Every structure is written in C-alpha cells, then in structure tokens.
Image (cartoon, helix red, strand yellow):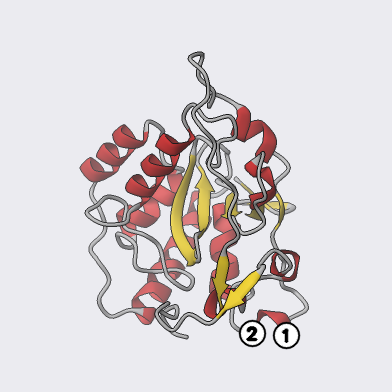
Amino acid sequence: MSVGSGSITAVTDIDDLIQRVATRAASDSGDLPEPVDKAQVAEAERQLGIALHPLLARLYGEVADGGFGPDYRLLPLLGPGSSVVGEYLTRREAAMGVEHPEWPEGVVPILTWGCAMYAGVDCLSEDGQVLLFEPNPYSGGSWEQCWFLDSPSLAAWLETWLAGTGWFEEDASDGDDVVEPRPWEQAADRLSSGDRRAHGAAPERSPTTRAVCLPCAAQFPAPLAEFAPGRVPNPGHPSPPGV
C-alpha cells in the first residue's frame, strides 16, 4: 500500500496508524459510537455491492462507527440517517441512466465538508485514494470538473489529519507544507464507465448556481475558492466540531 513516494508494507505500520487514530478519536470525543462488528461490515458491503477498502473497514471495526476525523467527522457506516451506505446508494441511484453521472462507482462518501461537498474513499483503488467532490464549479455537462484528488491513499490522508497539515485545517493558509487537492485525472473515465443504460439516458439535472455559506467558503483551498460564486453568510449552518 503506497503513500506518496514511500510505501507501507508492514502490517504493524497499519496497526500503529489505527492505534494513533483511535487515540486521537478518543481525545477529540468522549462519546464515540461503538465500532461495528463483522456482520455489519458484511451487510454494508452487500448493500454497496463492493468491498470496503481494507483500512476503511478496520477504522469502522476497530476505532468507532464514525464520529471521528476532520471537521464534521466520519459518517456512520449504516443508517438510520445519513450514512456511508445510504449516501452512496442515493448518489449511485441518481447516476444510473443519465448522460452525465455525477458519482462514480466504488467511491464511498465518508464525510461531508458542508455545502454539498464530500470526502470519498475510492474502494476500487489499491491504496484507497481519497477524493473531494466539490459541486460548486458545475456548469453543465460532465461532472469531472467537480472531482479532486485529496490524497493518494487513505493512510496518507489520515496521517495528514493527525499531523494537522490538511487543507481543511483552520490555519492551513499559514503553512508551507499544506498539499491542496488537485483535479482527479481519472474522473472522466470513472464517471463514464458502467453508468449508461441501453434504454437511453434519463433527463439531466439543470446546472444551478450554488450559494456557499461562509463557514464552508473559509475552508476552500486556493484552487477551489474561485468556484464559490455566491459566498453568503448562513447562520443556520452548523460550524464543524471544534471550530
């Protein structure tokens, strides 16, 4: 499992990472949900139709059923309410049969950044690359412009969170070592594969101008900030935990 230019090959390295994540999660929240069991992981994978990335499955099975991680924190694996499985199935259903699907197969949403933005783990990639879905630049046609590569691996993404050097950190603009999301080169291919149906495409959703509330706009890394056309205050939008 590669992370950047290096690699994680020893099982103990992943074990150590999970332990550090668990320690941080317990420190951030005194009321974490219980981890899921193997039967719940199996049920989630049955509903998803794909296997979870191994590290993602271990996080839910050994740390907690969501409630930890950056900002709004990881979603629970299963419902009720917003969950990894529920969000994925909703988005994949909407992608079926349309000419320009917005959500690719195999990318499971793990948390929301607010204002319709999501972090997703690509369970079809060996390293579990972490993607950013940012719909504000959408102006019609392909949704590939809305997909960014946040991290080449889930392990590296977690290390960035633990180190406090993610673009999503409140003081990210002050750091020289912050790596900002970049356009996802595989977006066009992944969005077009397996999403069209022989019986014709369903009607496309009309592009809309989205108003982005200030708590979310403040988090945008530089490459994304220009795509927030209507930054408006939204007193009803909850601030991320810890902000």
Residue 99 percent location from the top left of the image: 58, 29
Q: Which residue in the rendered view is the most extreme toward the right?
A: 176
- Which element carries disc 1, helix, strand or loop? helix
Residue 45 percent location from the top left of the image: 33, 37
Any part of residue 182 in sight: yes
Q: Which residue in the rendered view is the most extreme toward the top?
A: 198
Q: CA distance from mark 2 to mark 1?
A: 6 Å
Task: Check residue 174 in the rendering and tell me which mark sits there, or answer none.
Answer: 1
Task: Check residue 171 in the rendering and tell me which mark sits there, or answer none.
Answer: 2
The three-letter code of the residue at mark 1 reads Asp
- Which element carries disc 2, helix, strand or loop? loop
Any part of residue 164 in sight: no
In the rendered image of this protein, does residue 28 appear above or below residue 2? below
Identify which residue is drawn at 67% across, 31% down. Answer: 189
Residue 147 percent location from the top left of the image: 64, 49
* Quarter residue 174 falls in: bottom right
In the rendered image of this protein, does residue 133 appear above or below residue 74? above
The three-letter code of the residue at mark 2 reads Asp
Residue 142 percent location from the top left of the image: 66, 39
Task: Check residue 42 in the rendering and tell me which mark sits there, or answer none.
Answer: none
In front of the other: 135 or 240: 135
In front of the other: 36 or 185: 185
Identify which residue is drawn at 38% across, 73% down. Answer: 25
In front of the other: 132 or 44: 132
147 relative to 47 in the view: left or right = right
For the residues labelled 2 and 1, say whether their Cβ atoms are less than 8 Å apart.
Answer: yes
Q: Quadrant of the N terminus?
A: top right
